[in-house]
Image (tube, rainbow, N blue to C red):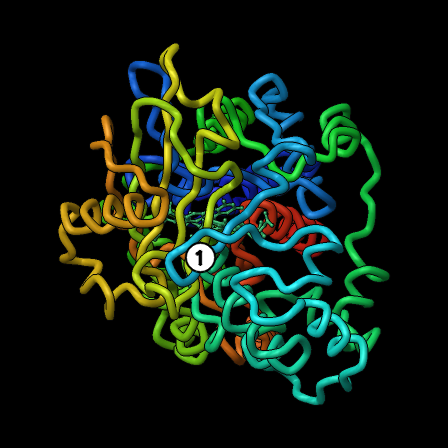
Amino acid sequence: MQRTVAVLGGGVSGLAACYYLAKSPQAPKIILLEGSSRLGGWIHSTRTEDGAVFEHGPRGIRSGAMGKNTLHLVSDLGLEAEVLPVPGDHPASKNRYLYVRGALHKLPSGIGDILRTVPPFTRPLFWGVLRDLTARRGAQPDETIHAFVSRRFGQEVADIVIDSLCRGVFAGDCRALSVRSCFPALFQAEQEYRSAILGMALGGEKSAPLDSPLIYRAYAEDWSQWSLRSGMETLPQALQDFLRQRGGEIHCDAPVRRLERTAGGRWKIALEDGTVEADHVVSAVPARALASLLPHWAEPLAQELRQIQAVSVGVVNLQYEGAALPVTGFGHLVPSFEDNSVLGIVYDSVAFPEQDGSGHPLTRLTVMLGGAWFTQSLGDPETVSPAELLSRAQAAVTAHLGLLAKPTCTIVKVQKACIPQYTLGHGKRLGAISRYLEQAGLPLSLVGASYEGVSVNDCISNSGRVVSKLLGEAC
Ligand SMILES: Cc1cc2nc3c(=O)[nH]c(=O)nc-3n(C[C@H](O)[C@H](O)[C@H](O)COP(=O)(O)OP(=O)(O)OC[C@H]3O[C@@H](n4cnc5c(N)ncnc54)[C@H](O)[C@@H]3O)c2cc1C
Ligand SMILES: C=Cc1c2[nH]c(c1C)Cc1[nH]c(c(CCC(=O)O)c1C)Cc1[nH]c(c(C)c1CCC(=O)O)Cc1[nH]c(c(C)c1C=C)C2
């Protein structure tokens, strides 16, 4: 009899798991259970009547070796014509800024910027490079990102560059996040080559085979990132269409309430209005959500899952008449010592002007607020007023970019618990989780941003890896 796999959660991880299951020659029966009324999870785009696109989650997917899987999937779904690339020589690829001590500073890029003292730094970054090349290998099994970078490159690099970078990827605090889990390539580079710079240069990302015209183009044009013309949400929509065509069952508004085992060793999945049985469950819901679904006898597993927490981000989309930014680039980040409530501002119109809509010049910006500092700087994410977030965002745009005009369109979202935090000990937690699953022989696989990478690329490639393992072993 055909086996049944239930996938819990219809964000990009759950949808990608369904895609890989459906592609397999031994495809099982697939049931996707999504708690909300729409698929895509944090991938969420608004398309206005005049053609502008506003992203409330990811807006660009990184190209390069890690992104190869995603481009492959995009080609397979027939979305090539939708891709909006950002080539390597584009200002949005070359220019990123920091807002420090009341001014914007371009992040150093060429060798000249490293040899000279460039603000906001008090001495040439070359000293940091020299320190990394000569420092001893660390002996700790894990370390915070801040401690690792201070030790290898000096405190100024950690306080300004790395503090900002962690806010711009994890919306998190580099003094709490684990280097081993957040930047495994950096951690490995030190272990293998003693120097993080040498290791990244010599070990680096392996160049991927150019096995589709889209991947070939991405390499030839040196894309830094790409988006989709009508917004990133086109991707989950195409995955949903693909799954339907392959006969997968999709249930929205179907929050899973409880997981139990039947006497025959199957899963009994309790929904609000009934139950579903499956031979295997792929969980693509956040770790804490899964913890609340598990049977009482799986408490040791639930305890580990509960420790993987996530932070909230206020995402404020703003549109202005005219094109009046003082600098051109991807956007700017704000280190926590400058203003912990504003994480950074993305200049969406620079990277993707095609999404501005209407014929006349416009500027679209996204201000990101809060993250690990949400409660202390903005209050409870459950009760914070959208008007307060809008006012903070507009004040930041005026102070940082000098825009005084009133925005012509605004959208405010409070994205609650949206980015998981891989804090110190995350790797140990993952070890305990996989040992439990193995020893208990549970037909349960875990995918999603809670575990091994928060980017869309990571989510898709981890779903592919987990599904291959599952089909190879069990289904
Ligand atoms: C503001 C923001 C900006 C980002 N920017 C980028 C970027 O530029 N580039 C990039 O690569 N990544 C970016 N990311 C990260 C990336 O978008 C996410 O990590 C990724 O989309 C997570 O996907 P997921 O499927 O693992 O989880 P989710 O999207 O959280 O999906 C989980 C799904 O499970 C459902 N669910 C929860 N509980 C239940 C239940 N009990 N029963 C059934 N369903 C349930 C939820 O409704 C949800 O649909 C960004 C994220 C955010 C929030
Ligand atoms: C200001 C807050 C945020 C901005 N983007 C995100 C937050 C929290 C979320 C985010 N951004 C990226 C990823 C994926 C990581 C990946 O490995 O692909 C996520 C989850 C991409 C990214 N954004 C910045 C960097 C350095 C990266 C890593 C990949 C890359 O090098 O492109 C910097 C950055 N993010 C934001 C701004 C304003 C900014 C820099 C100017 C917004």
Q: Is residue 282 above or below residue 166?
A: above
Residue nearest the viewer, comparing 61 with 435: 61
Three-letter code, disc 1:
Trp
Question: What percent of the width, then of the height, locates residue 373?
Answer: 32, 67
**Residue at the spot x=59%, y=35% of the render?**
91
Q: Is residue 258 left or right of residue 378?
A: right
Q: Residue at 77% of width from left, 77% of height from top? A: 191
Q: Is residue 472 left or right of residue 107?
A: right
The residue lying toward the viewer, choosing from 80 and 101, is 101
Q: Is residue 247 visible?
A: no
In percent of the image, x 47 and y 77: which residue is there?
175
Please indicate whether residue 388 sits to the left or right of residue 72 in the image.
Answer: left
Q: Position of residue 96 (x, y in %)?
A: 55, 47
Q: Image quadrant of residue 335?
A: bottom left
Image height check: is 353 above or below 454?
above
How many dots with numbers?
1
Q: Which residue is mark 1?
A: 267
**Quadrant placement of the N terminus:** top right
Residue 251 visible within the image: yes
Picture coordinates of residue 93, whole percent (x, y)? 62, 39
